[in-house]
Amino acid sequence: MRSVIAILALALMANALPIWARAQTADKQVEAKTENRLDKLFADLKRERNEKAAERIAGQIWGEWNSSGSASIDLMMLWSQQAIDAKKYDVALDFLDQVTTLQPKYAEGWNRRATVHFLMQNYRKSVVDIERTLLLEPRHFGALSGMAQIMATTGHKDMALKAWQRVLEIYPMMRNAQSEVSRLSEELAGESI
């Protein structure tokens, strides 16, 4: 009887392995297509000199970032945003903890959690999540903007300036970043006199 069960288990595993391998290949193909779309969008964003057109491209990038590839993760991200909107930050964190646990390579899960920590004034935790976001997506201008805001809030103007400058390397037409670079440059120049 045991040998029959063992043979059935081996047969099931033999059939499951090709399915698993095909699923892995399909996932990699989807990731590659998404990465190619993002590369093109970032190249377009860097070249665009019309503010409104750049905003549209940035919106498309956010759309790519927000798509996790998992209906469950997307639903938890929606629920986390609803909790944020209702200022129920602990509830949002519960959802985002699940997102980052279930899909640790999903940069936007980390970025959203960084945002919640920022809103709760947990700046150290926010910075840790921003760093994780940037490891996964170094061009994440939203995470870089968050880092700049934290640095400015905590009195590290020179680091805030560097973060805003990095944002402008990626998204040259972001008006907020342009204003912050100008403001911080003037403040730091005035402090050095």
Image (cartoon, helix red, strand yellow):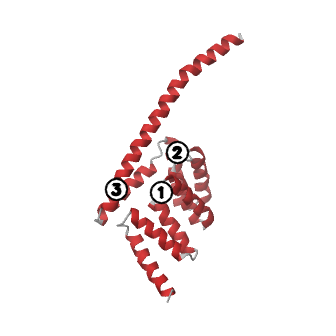
Residue 109, percent from left and from top:
53, 52
Query: Which label sits on residue 43?
Result: 3
Quadrant showing the N terminus: top right
**Few, some or many residues within 10 Å of mark 1 (<14, 14–19, 20+):** some
Classify 32 as above or below 156: above
Q: Earlier in the sequence, mark 3 or mark 1?
A: 3
Residue at 52% across, 66% down: 147
Q: Locate residue 62, reporting x and y percent.
A: 41, 55
Amino acid type, callout 2: Ile
State the residue position of label 1: 138
Q: Amino acid at mark 1?
A: Pro
Q: Which mark is residue 73?
A: 2
The answer to the question of whether label 3 and label 1 lie on touching residues, with beta carbons closer than 8 A, is no
Residue 18 locus on image (x, y percent): 51, 24
Q: Secondary structure at mark 2?
A: helix
- The residue lying toward the viewer, choosing from 149 and 99, is 149
Between the C-alphas of marks 3 and 2, the distance is 28 Å
